[in-house]
Structures are given as C-alpha cells and as structure tokens.
Image (cartoon, rainbow, N blue to C red):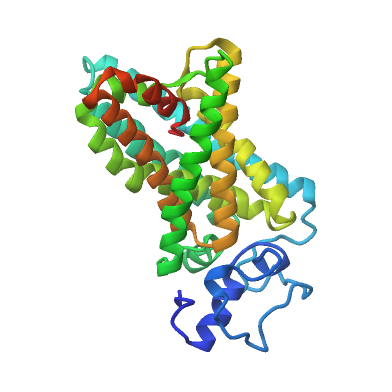
C-alpha cells in the first residue's frame, strides 16, 4: 500500500479510497496526516455512491446491507472473539492441570500471545475472509501502513493524554469510597514484578495489535460502513470494555461495573484516534504505550516504596488486558 506521505499523486488517491468506512471513509474534514496531500479529480467524494461488487473498492458493504444488520454483525464478531478467547483460556487451564501446571511465563505466553492471536486475530481475519476480502483489501480496509512522523507523535501523545484522563477519573472514583474491580493480570504483575518487562513487550507485540485489530479495525470499521463516526466509536467501545470483564476480580457486581466504566474512556479515545488517522498501526501503538505506562507505574510503585501503593492500585484498575 502506498504511503500517503510519499508525494505520489496516484498513491494519495489510493490512500483516500482505501479506507472502508462510509462517507468516503473520513470524518468531516480530512485527517491530519493527509492534510498536505493534493486532491485527485478522480477521488471519490463524500456523496458518491459505492459499488460493493467492485474488487478495487475495499468498502466491503453488501448490497441491501441494513444498519441493523451492520450493527449486529459488527457486535457479533466482537463478542464471538471474546468467547473464543475465553474458550481458549479454559482449554489452556485444563491442559495445564493435566500436565501438572505451567510456569508463570508459559501461562502468560499462552493466554496473551497464543490466546489473543488465535481468538482476536483469528476471528477478525476469518470474518473478513468470509466477506470475500483478500490480503490487499484487508490491509486497505483496516488502514495498515507505516505511521508518519506526525502519526507517531499522535500515538505517543494520545497514550499520555489517555493516561492522564484515566488517572484523574480513577482518582475521583476512589475518592468516593467506591472500589472498582482489579485487573487480574495487573495483580499477577504486582506479585511477580520480574515479569513486568516481559509483559510490557507483550503490550506492543500482542495486546495492542490484537485488540485493536478486532475492536477498532474490524468492529469499528464495519460499523462505519453504515454509521457516522460518533456512534461507531461508541458502539465499538461498548463491545471492547465489557470484553475485559473476564479479567476483573473483586468488588462485586458494582466493582466490576465501575471497572468496565473506567475502561470505556481509553476505548473511546482509541476509537477517536483510529477514526482521525485511519491507521491501525497508530492506535495499536497508542494502546501498547498506554498499557506500558500503567505497567511501569506498577513496577515503580513496587520497587520504590509502599507510599505508591495507591497509585499502583489505580493503575491496576485501568489496565485494559
């Protein structure tokens, strides 16, 4: 796929038509990363119709596709991916019991790497293939390309900003005396700080790419075929946040609901950045960076004193893995 920053007029036109969402695949106003691109006279306008049978157009919308069907299929593939992950996790647990247990590192590798790639990546890829997408259309539909310098800055600044917003909201919730459910993965990391650097690497190589591939790349992009940006982002986030219920523990029903609610905020910001840039790599990098900031907070809290335990608890609540 041609880099939109290359200056090639043909590449610019391809980039503009590669996105698989409605309204020409863009929010009102061009995305910042394309602001300097020249406009090709043959570029599809917002009001131009889309031919879903055209193999050169990766929109993926099917003839007679209703809004209800679009929402149902998008939510369905996200939920199915979560169930697949749960099923794989139970399968790994059963195998572990049969062989006398796995080491912590092996358990993490199975649940994070194997589980997420097979469940989130596998389900999302299977869905797109069933819709008739070949490799080039999948790459175009998802917006998989090397980030520009501006997009890289967006990813890093976005992660830091998301962290700041999430910490403020978490502090407000904790100040009321409420106790959101804790993330089990974060609790394991706090009990075994030596594995935190390994988990940080997994955030960039596994969690960020796999979760964003399914929930933003597949679910949100599918929703954008029939919906405008805001409802698509909200619905995708409403699928993403509850998907983490399996990793939350403690606090009862209220604590779990609070934990899910706190995860909605990062999800909305991930979705907004994906909509703005149209680049899946950017939002995967942002997600991985955000998680890594929280994990680093846990590590610092453990290494440098009990006075930071409250901050560590806040971080454990906000970790979306």
**Image mark count:** 0
- Determine which quarter of the picture holds residue 292: top left
Q: Residue at x 62, y 72 (%)?
A: 57
Above or below residue 219? Residue 228 is below
- Determine which quarter of the picture holds residue 62: bottom right
Above or below residue 76? Residue 219 is below
Q: Pick the residue in front: 247 or 219.
A: 247
Quadrant placement of the C terminus = top left
Q: Pick the residue in front: 174 or 222.
A: 174
State the image coordinates of residue 128 (x, y, percent, origin top left).
55, 54
Above or below residue 36? Residue 197 is above
State the image coordinates of residue 298 (x, y, percent, origin top left).
32, 29
**Residue 91 in sight from this viewpoint:** no
Above or below residue 21? Residue 168 is above
State the image coordinates of residue 131 (x, y, percent, origin top left).
60, 56
Q: Residue at x 55, y 45 (%)?
A: 215
Question: Which residue is most to the front?
Answer: 307
Q: Residue at x 45, y 74 (%)?
A: 1
Q: Residue at x 62, y 63 (%)?
A: 20
- Determine which quarter of the picture holds residue 257: top right
**Residue 208 in sight from this viewpoint:** yes
């Amino acid at each position: 796929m041609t880099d939109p920053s290359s200056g090639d007029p043909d590449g610019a036109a391809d980039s503009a038509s590669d996105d698989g969402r409605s309204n020409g695949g863009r929010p009102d106003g061009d995305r910042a990363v394309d602001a300097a691109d020249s406009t090709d006279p043959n570029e599809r306008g917002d009001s131009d119709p889309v031919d879903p049978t055209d193999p050169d157009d990766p929109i993926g919308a099917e003839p007679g596709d209703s809004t209800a069907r679009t929402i149902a299929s998008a939510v369905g593939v996200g939920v199915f991916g979560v169930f697949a992950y749960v099923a794989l996790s139970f399968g790994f647990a059963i195998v572990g019991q049969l062989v006398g247990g796995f080491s912590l590192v092996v358990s993490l590798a199975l649940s994070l790497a194997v589980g997420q790639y097979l469940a989130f990546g596998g389900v999302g890829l299977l869905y797109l293939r069933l819709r008739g997408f070949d490799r080039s259309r999948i790459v175009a539909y998802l917006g998989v390309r090397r980030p520009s310098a501006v997009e890289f800055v967006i990813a890093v600044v976005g992660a830091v900003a998301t962290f700041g917003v999430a910490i403020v909201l978490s502090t407000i919730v904790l100040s009321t005396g409420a106790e959101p459910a804790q993330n089990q993965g974060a609790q394991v990391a706090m009990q075994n700080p030596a594995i935190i650097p390994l988990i940080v690497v997994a955030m960039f190589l596994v969690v960020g790419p796999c979760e964003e591939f399914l929930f933003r790349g597949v679910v949100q992009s599918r929703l954008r075929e029939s919906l405008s940006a805001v409802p698509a982002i909200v619905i995708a986030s409403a699928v993403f946040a509850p998907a983490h219920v399996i990793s939350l523990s403690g606090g009862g029903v209220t604590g779990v609901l609070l934990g899910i609610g706190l995860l909605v905020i990062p999800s909305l910001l991930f979705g907004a950045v994906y909509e703005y840039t149209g680049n899946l790599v950017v939002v995967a990098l942002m997600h991985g960076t955000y998680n890594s900031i929280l994990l680093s907070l846990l590590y610092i809290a453990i290494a440098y004193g009990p006075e930071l335990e409250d901050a560590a608890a806040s971080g454990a609540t906000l970790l979306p893995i």
